[in-house]
Image: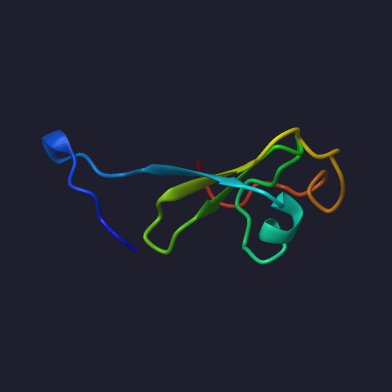
Amino acid sequence: MFSLPLPNHRQLQHLLLNVWDGVHTLSRLVINRPPRDGHMAFIRSPDQISIELLQKGAPLAPAEPWLSMENTGSW
């Protein structure tokens, strides 16, 4: 993972990525906050940076297994 120098000794705590195929992308990752709304999910990097994944374009229809999946970890 990389580190970004930010003013006042702050650290990068959140990163956003737009993805074309959210279902395929999420099927390959460990999800901390599933996309129950069909649009947004969160994963964490090994160094605990929160990474937000947004479905590009219109949200997908809410579906299993994401619809009933609980959040993992603390936010």
Where residue 30 sits: x, y (%)? 62, 62
Q: Position of residue 74 (x, y in %)?
A: 52, 45
Direction left: furthest residue = 8
Give the left or right position of residue 16, taking residue 47 as reference. Answer: right
Q: Residue at x 14, y 40 (%)?
A: 9
Residue at the (19%, 40%) spot, across then down = 6
Q: Quadrant of residue 39?
A: top right
Up-down: is 47 above or below 4? below
The picture places residue 34, in percent across and down from the top left corner, at 69, 47
Position of residue 27 in the picture relative to residue 65 (left or right): left
The quarter of the displayed image where residue 53 is located: top right
Left or right: 43 as drawn, with respect to 10: right
Q: Is residue 10 left or right of residue 69?
A: left
Depth check: give the residue in front, 70 or 43.
43
- Residue at left offset 86%, top offset 38%: 61
Specify the quadrant of the image occupied by residue 7: top left
Quick one: 54 or 32, which is closer to the camera? 54
Q: Position of residue 16 (x, y in %)?
A: 48, 42
Q: Nearer the viewer, residue 1 or 33?
A: 1
Quarter of the picture containing the N terminus is bottom left
Q: Residue at x 83, y 53 (%)?
A: 65
User: How are the colours assigned in the image?
Assistant: rainbow
